[in-house]
Amino acid sequence: MDRRASQLELELASRLLAAEGALELNRECDLEALSRVFQKLYGPLAAIVGPAGNLALAERAMHLASNECPNLRVVLPILQENRLSFDGLDSSLAGMTDVAVRQGVLALLGNFLWLTSSLVGPDLTIRLIQTAWPAISHAGWMSGSTEQES
């Protein structure tokens, strides 16, 4: 049985998407916001796990998300010029409702956050997120986090 993101990681994923402009259910906004979130996380995370580690996390997150959104099975995470992108993401979600797209995007990002937390620890994951989004409160949001809100 595969483990996957908890409601905590999915809620954090939703807040990160909103911080990047996905405030309403809209396929294009969701995909653009997802791209921005991954780009903001890429540099700080690559400093810890390297580009290959970042790619491996994205590949595993995509696999887990495809269990919830089968259209994602054809999407391939790739690294190009120190940038993580998802080849085929746009076309794989074509024709899906905005709600279904949001669920797929949240599954991908939520699982990425959960896997990152599992690898580097929840406290370091929260610090990485706070570096990119200092205005978002993260206290207690990652499974197993010991960080308290001040």
Image (spheres, rainbow, N blue to C red):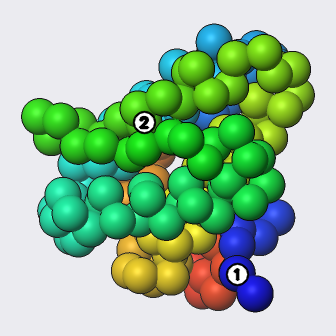
Which residue is located at x 34 percent, y 65 percent?
56
Residue 102 at least partly seen: yes
The residue beneath circle 2 is 86
At numbered mark 1, what does the secondary structure look like: helix, strand or loop? loop
As displayed, is residue 94 above or below residue 115?
A: above
As displayed, is residue 41 above or below residue 34?
A: below
- Using residue 70 as the reference point, say whether residue 61 is left or right of it: left
> Which quadrant would the C terminus be assigned to in this image?
bottom right
Using the rendered view, name the quadrant where residue 27 is placed. Answer: top right
Which residue is located at x 26 percent, y 68 percent?
53
- The residue under label 1 is which amino acid type? Asp
Which residue is located at x 67 percent, y 55 percent?
65
- Point out the tag, 2 or 1, that comes first from the N-terminus: 1
The residue beneath circle 1 is 2
- The mark found on residue 37 in the picture is none
As displayed, is residue 109 above or below residue 57?
A: above
Which one is nearer the viewer's eye here, 68 or 127?
Answer: 68
Circle 1: is it few (<14), some (14-19), or many (20+) Cα within 10 Å? few
Residue 1 x %, y %: 75, 87
Residue 40 x %, y %: 35, 39
